[in-house]
Amino acid sequence: MRKSPRKRNSRGRKLVKFPAVSRGRADGFRVGWQHGHWFGQCESVLQRTIRPYGLKQAHVMFVATGKGFPYSPIDESVANALRGQVTELTITDSQQPVADIALRIRPDIVIVLDGLQFNVIHAERMRQAGIRTAIWFTDDPYYTDITKGIAPFFDEVFTLELVCVDYYRQLGCPSVHYLPLGADPVHFRPRNPLRSQRHDICFIGSAYWNRVEFFNQVTRYLATKDTHISGIWWERLRDFKLMQSRIGLGRWMGPEETANMYNGAKIVINMHRATDDETFNNNSAGITAVSPNPRTFEISGCATLQLTDIRSDLVSFYTPGVDIVTYESPQEMVEKIGYYLTHEDERRAIAMKSMHRTMTEHTYSSRIEKMLSILFPG
């Protein structure tokens, strides 16, 4: 039998096959196939969460923060959700002559987001002109020294922190509602991240002192794993040099890159800010917090396992052990990381349930639907 000719390159030299290259190609194909299969499963589930939203016969004027990043993605998410649920929408921001615009167009309601840089004179003028106003606080209770002087000027107050509902009512606000932020499926959804964005463990956020103290106790463990941390102030870590190669120091990532990092991780850690951090907060009243942060919904929307510290009202949104995993101590975090890194089927089942629940209950569209049902009942 005639042997087939050996393959040669353009210069006529024999091509030599290297076992390592072949193994790398096979491993890459296997990993790619596995992720493609998982991504397809996620998309199938995601398609089943899509539903139409009702349209309110109302003219809403939305006042975005106008503060730029990192608030601009929230501005955009809220605006898009409103755009799909009201018959007429006017968009402006806190840097504009809001009262003048409102008095000219006479909307059914003016909704102000965040409001920390909003001049309450505009709210007073609109109220005197008989125009309804609402504000949605996005950072409670961390800046309540500021918001306590803003809330009483509005007809309707929405807060993402359950404890702050009674706080604003005690200030004399007649109509206060609990409404957390959510996830925007445009960004926080299953994705196919780059290889460089894939890690076993991921944490994205600023190194507030409570986080530094906690991470100081798990740094040596995380240094032995494929870990990636991104954010400001992480040089505060006691063993920063040990983790330096695993930290994207001083980086602010946009929502798409953040979502890619979440998607590329097997486990994403979530840790809430402390409410008593006097070095950064404006919360002299010492108001505590029980509600989950916005990151809770964004991580879950990416169909990755979320390992979060406990806020007591978390159970109103997810079920620990079913669609989210919690920890109470550094030791428990380490134990659960080790467990879920070696139990892939369980990890993925929880992540899939978390994504499904987020997309059906905790998107910005679902939050705006609830807000509009309160503002325009019936």
Image (cartoon, grey):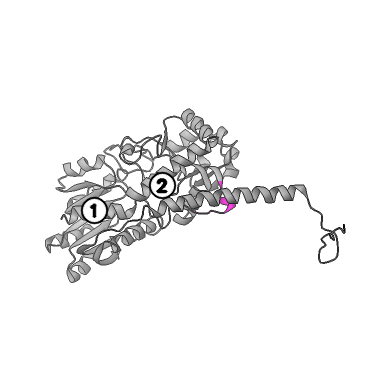
Tell me the element at label 1.
helix
Count the numbered circles shown.
Answer: 2
Q: Is residue 96 visible?
A: no
Question: In which quadrant of the rendered image does the C terminus lie?
Answer: bottom left
Q: Is residue 194 magenta?
A: yes
Can residue 54 be seen here? yes
User: Mark 1, residues whose alpha carbon is within 10 Å: few (<14), some, or many (≥20)?
Assistant: some
Q: CA distance from mark 1 to mark 2?
A: 23 Å
| The image quarter in which residue 161 lies | top left
Report which residue position mark 2 lands on. 355
Q: Earlier in the sequence, mark 1 or mark 2?
A: 2
**What is the x, y in percent for residue 286?**
29, 37
Q: Are marks 1 and 2 in contact (CB under 8 Å)?
A: no
Q: Secondary structure at mark 2?
A: helix
User: Residue, x 35% and y 58% (percent of image)?
Assistant: 77
Amino acid marked by disc 1: Met
Q: Which mark is residue 371?
A: 1
Instruction: Decide if residue 218 is on the left or right side of residue 22.
Output: left
